[in-house]
Image (tube, rainbow, N blue to C red):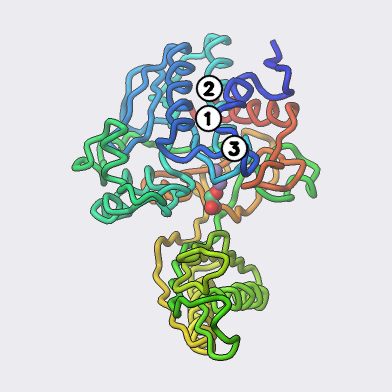
């Protein structure tokens, strides 16, 4: 049976196609523990239970749907359900829906897993509410200080600890969870491709080879708030002018270092009045590079230039690191197993970060990418054709059969 729906999407994706639609930005806004993300969690639990899986939440807000008894060394597949603001329908949900679909297919064929198996949903992968990506997998694997996470705040000033409590977690129990981590024998994440690699290669599916080093930095510019009409253009201390000049310097610096990427996608202007020269501006930098060294150099140069530009505008800037992820090379032996099970699909480097990257510190991990015909991601135009989605599920099913 081909699980086709009216919208041309796989049935599972179609079921959630109206959850978290963002009428203002376009696309979907499904930040962690928002109404829409909670709705997706309920949908996941119902979907998994319909397949006879036992769903449990761990102490960091990640969900685990077990086919058979939980145990150490499990094969785990899945992804995330949260999104960036105004994101596309596939980044995250494609991996979750494909995992459930692969389980359904295996069950229909009478397959019995030969080792523990779970579908996982990781919490706050995008970091769109609390600023740090992959918080669920980072906390579980013990790679972030839980005190720091508890104190993170969202745009409304709500702390992670309070939001976690409201979501039914005990904030005191957040952090390293070696028992849960030990259950991951290997993790496989199927994901929409977020660039044009598979368009160029004319292939529906690839395996991932690596992830760029990447991180996020806060640039806090301070100036002097003042009257827009009564203040001469000369001698202003306008932190938004400093921040704007820094944005172009950031772009130019990244252009000068091969393989680097640097983006300012978010900016807050205080106090934010049309007739008010701002007093402070916070902008957030996302910087990535082939290696940690390249990325550190890129950010050091950006900090140096921003400092000079702020001074030229009579302002100051403080640059603070908010998160960091080293470059990841996916597990070579697992990659080989995937490639041989799939008959030599192409391998692609990932410019995007993933839970599979974070989890590579606790277990062998790998990823499958499904072609994105627009080459666009983190935007409403992100897409996967049904045929390619089905090819991705075929690949996932094949790999799971071999691994289980
Ligand atoms: C996650 O999608 C990231 O790379 O920002
Ligand atoms: Mn994403
Ligand atoms: Mn993702």
Instruction: Tell me where residue 84 appears, x and y as whole percent.
Output: 54, 45
Q: Which mark is residue 22?
A: 3
- Of tags 3 and 1, the one toward the viewer is 3
Is disc 1 placed on a helix, strand or loop? helix
Q: Residue furthest front?
A: 230
Q: Are marks 1 and 2 in contact (CB under 8 Å)?
A: yes
Question: Can you say whether 53 is above or below 334 in the image?
Answer: above
Q: Which mark is residue 210?
A: none
For the residues labelled 1 and 2, the Cα–Cα distance comes to: 6 Å
Is disc 3 placed on a helix, strand or loop? loop
Q: Residue at x 21, y 40 (%)?
A: 173
Whichever of callouts 3 and 1 sits on the residue coming sooner in the sequence is: 3
Question: Can you say whether 274 is above or below 148 in the image?
Answer: below
Q: Which residue is mark 2?
A: 100
Packing grade of label 3 (10 A; few <14, some 14-19, many >=20) is some
Instruction: Tell me where residue 289 appears, x and y as whole percent.
Output: 56, 67
From the image, which quarter does the N terminus lie in? top right
Foreground pick, 312 / 274: 274
Question: Can you say whether 101 is above or below 78 in the image?
Answer: above
Q: Residue at x 65, y 50 (%)?
A: 348
* Count of numbered marks: 3
Quarter-of-image position of residue 317: bottom left
- Of tags 3 and 2, the one toward the viewer is 3
Q: Which residue is mark 1?
A: 96
Foreground pick, 369 / 138: 138
Q: Residue at x 49, y 47 (%)?
A: 126
Instruction: Tell me where residue 397 appears, x and y as whole percent.
Output: 59, 25
Q: Quadrant of ligand 3?
A: top right
């Amino acid at each position: 049976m081909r699980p086709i729906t009216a919208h041309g999407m796989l049935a599972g994706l179609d079921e959630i196609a109206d959850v978290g639609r963002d009428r203002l930005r376009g696309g979907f806004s499904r930040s962690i523990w928002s109404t829409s993300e909670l709705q997706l969690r309920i949908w996941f639990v119902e979907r998994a239970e319909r397949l006879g899986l036992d769903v449990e939440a761990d102490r960091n807000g990640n969900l685990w749907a077990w086919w058979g008894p939980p145990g150490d060394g499990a094969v785990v597949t899945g992804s995330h359900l949260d999104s960036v603001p105004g994101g596309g329908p596939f980044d995250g949900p494609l991996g979750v829906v494909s995992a459930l679909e692969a389980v359904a297919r295996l069950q229909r064929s009478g397959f019995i897993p030969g080792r523990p198996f779970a579908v996982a949903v990781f919490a706050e992968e995008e970091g769109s509410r609390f600023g740090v990506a992959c918080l669920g997998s980072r906390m579980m694997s013990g790679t972030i200080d839980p005190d720091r996470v508890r104190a993170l705040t969202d745009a409304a000033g709500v702390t992670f600890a309070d939001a976690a409590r409201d979501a039914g977690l005990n904030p005191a129990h957040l952090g390293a969870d070696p028992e849960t981590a030990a259950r991951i024998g290997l993790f496989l994440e199927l994901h929409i491709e977020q660039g044009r690699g598979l368009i160029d290669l004319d292939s529906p599916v690839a395996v991932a080879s690596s992830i760029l080093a990447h991180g996020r930095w806060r640039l806090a510019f301070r100036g002097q708030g003042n009257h827009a009409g009564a203040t001469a253009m000369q001698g202003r201390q306008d932190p938004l002018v400093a921040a704007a000049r820094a944005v172009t310097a950031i772009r130019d610096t990244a252009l000068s270092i091969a393989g680097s990427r640097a983006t300012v996608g978010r900016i807050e202007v205080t106090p934010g009045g049309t007739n008010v020269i701002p007093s402070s501006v916070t902008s957030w930098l996302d910087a990535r590079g082939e290696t940690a060294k390249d990325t550190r150099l890129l950010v050091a140069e950006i900090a140096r230039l921003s400092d000079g530009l702020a001074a030229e505008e009579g302002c100051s800037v403080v640059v603070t690191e908010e998160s960091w992820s080293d470059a990841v090379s996916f597990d070579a032996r697992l990659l080989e197993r995937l490639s041989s099970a799939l008959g030599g699909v192409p391998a692609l480097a990932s410019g995007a970060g993933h839970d599979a990257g974070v989890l590579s510190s606790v277990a062998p991990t790998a990823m499958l990418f499904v072609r994105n015909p627009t080459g666009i991601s983190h935007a409403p135009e992100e897409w996967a054709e049904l045929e390619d989605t089905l090819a991705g599920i075929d690949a996932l099913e094949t790999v799971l059969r071999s691994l289980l």
